[in-house]
Image (spheres, rainbow, N blue to C red):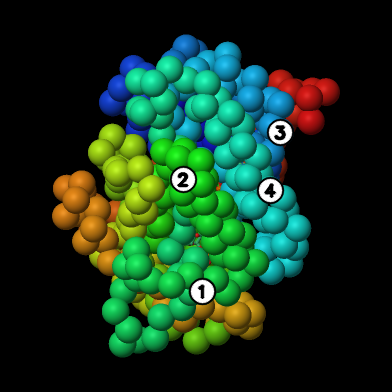
Amino acid sequence: MILVTGGAGFIGSNFVLDWLAQSDEKILNLDKLTYAGNLKNLSSLEKDSRHVFVLGDIGDIKLVSRLLVQYQPRAIINFAAESHVDRSIHGPEDFIQTNILGTFRLLEAARAYWNKLEVHEKQNFRFLHISTDEVYGSLTQIEPAFTEEHRYEPNSPYSASKASSDHLVRAYHHTYGLPVLTTNCSNNYGPFQFPEKLIPLMIVNALAGKPLPVYGDGLQIRDWLYVVDHCSAIRRVLEAGKPGETYNVGGWNEKPNIEIVQTICNLLEELYPGSTFHHLITYVKDRPGHDRRYAINAMKIERELNWKPAETFETGIRKTIQWYLNNQQWIADVQTGTYREWIEKNYAGLQ
Ligand code: NAD
Ligand code: DAU
């Protein structure tokens, strides 16, 4: 069995579904179900005994320690985090609590559990920490893409909290020998992404005829990775990554934000002949401290672990738009908050 934290969020739920589609190894899924956690993402697994869901906080060391002893996972994959830069600007506290303190406590529980394993299990155990390219800071137009050697220069409370957690993970390897792996990936997109992030927000707003808010001049650049490609990279790192190493994961798809929004409008116009969406594009006040450009050099994972993304942006964005069009009920449940009703009913008294 493996323990996945944050497995009801965007990337975590894609990972859980992808994992169980290819393997019968069980998943213990520990998630606090914040606003970003949505068990509807995993409704196809409701009767699947290979998926065990536990409502809880990675910072609850007693709970995590008990789960580790009870389920004896061979690996922990830590997706759990507060993940939205804009929210971190409005209220950084939760980011410090979960991303820094939570990761610290998860590491402590993992270390105690790992220390007591038999030699063989101890050697094979892995703690895989999911991080971000944002810890490297911002690039100018002409600087080369981030390699794993790039210095950490986080600029938002979110990226600073992720950088702190990465440092803790690194320290637990160097100090205690915990077999850790860290992946730093670029902007993910695809099914089940909460519509407060750029791509799903633009799709959902466009379908509702609402403005498409573009921050500043819209020329900030991100490197887009289809979430299923990210899942395959994580599986590969877990399988063959060298403990103590970090691996950058990217899609080789650098694009300015405005181009992303225009592409979404173009594709929607193709799918809905006669409708127009470009007129909805609205430039709004910039995000404070907005990083100008991220770009991932993903050569190390290609060279050492033979991993490459399968999707281009053109194929991935088509699949993503089609998924949102086919899942309007999922969008409605998120927008009305209905997705939380089941959680409240099922976990009454626990939250
Ligand atoms: P998300 O916000 O969609 O999901 C986060 C999940 O973690 C939610 O299910 C939430 O309920 C859970 N969670 C939050 N706090 C928790 C806690 N204290 N204990 C247990 N569970 C908790 O995030 P995401 O986009 O799926 O990102 C997953 C990971 O990948 C994060 O670590 C994020 O920093 C990293 N990352 C994301 C992107 C991206 O583009 N989305 C890119 C790079 C890295
Ligand atoms: O780079 C990896 C990071 O990507 C992850 O670590 C984060 O968890 C993830 O949320 C994402 O962060 P970004 O800030 O890049 O994602 P977001 O979708 O919020 O914004 C993408 C770009 O689009 C960014 O330059 C800001 C801009 N934007 C965003 C929103 C929500 C807009 O122009 N308008 C918007 O309304």
> Amino acid type of disc 2?
His
CA separation in Å, label 4 and label 3: 10 Å
Q: Position of residue 203 (x, y in %)?
A: 47, 59
Answer few, some or many: residues within 10 Å of disc 2's Cα (few below 14, many 20 plus, some between 14 and 19). Answer: some
What residue is pinned by disc 3?
60
Answer few, some or many: residues within 10 Å of disc 3's Cα (few below 14, many 20 plus, some between 14 and 19). Answer: few
CA separation in Å, label 4 and label 1: 20 Å
Q: Earlier in the sequence, mark 2 or mark 3?
A: 3
Does mark 4's beta carbon lie closer than 8 Å to ligand 1? Answer: no
Element type at marker 3?
loop
Q: Nearer the viewer, mark 2 or mark 3?
A: 2
Residue visible at 75% across and 28% down?
344
Image quadrant assignment for residue 290: bottom right
What residue is pinned by disc 1?
153
Answer few, some or many: residues within 10 Å of disc 4's Cα (few below 14, many 20 plus, some between 14 and 19). Answer: some
Q: Position of residue 76 (x, y in %)?
A: 47, 33
Q: Which mark is residue 101?
A: 4
What residue is pinned by disc 2?
173
CA separation in Å, label 1 and label 2: 22 Å
Does mark 3's beta carbon lie closer than 8 Å to ligand 1? Answer: yes
